[in-house]
Amino acid sequence: MDVNTFTEEDMNSSVKKESDQVMTTEAAAAFLAVSPALLIKWRLTGGGPRYAKLGRNVRYTKKNLEDFLRSSERTSTSDDGGRHDG
């Protein structure tokens, strides 16, 4: 096989999916356009996006942040559908 020839399977196995991208609290806050302090508050009180704890490190995946945004969508001001206090 030519070293410059890659199959689709090669590309899929060697390239990390964008949705699997892992972010720090600061990067996740920037992605959501909120403060890192709000993400910390949500971790303590609940209601925020899912996260992973790796030792002392907290990480968020892009997929979980996108899912959180989708679950926060509303159709009107009277639609409180699972309030996220900030």
Image: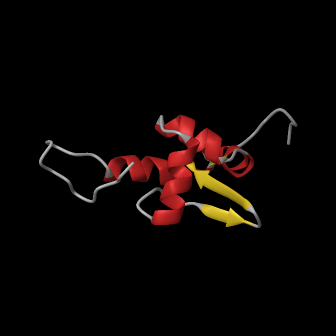
- Lateral position of residue 23 relative to residue 57, left or right: left
Q: Quadrant of residue 48?
A: bottom left
User: In the image, residue 1 lies at what x, y percent?
Assistant: 85, 42
User: In the image, residue 20 lies at what x, y percent?
Assistant: 61, 51
Q: Quadrant of residue 6?
A: top right
- Lateral position of residue 39 relative to residue 82, left or right: right
Q: Nearer the viewer, residue 14 or 68?
A: 68
The residue depicted at 27 percent of the width and 60 percent of the height is 82
User: In the image, residue 8 lies at what x, y percent?
Assistant: 65, 44
Is residue 44 positioned above or below 84 on the image? below
Q: Nearer the viewer, residue 60 or 83?
A: 83
The residue depicted at 67 percent of the width and 65 percent of the height is 53
Q: Quadrant of residue 77?
A: top left
Is residue 25 positioned above or below 49 on the image? above
The residue depicted at 73 percent of the width and 47 percent of the height is 10
The residue depicted at 63 percent of the width and 47 percent of the height is 25
- Lateral position of residue 84 relative to residue 35, left or right: left
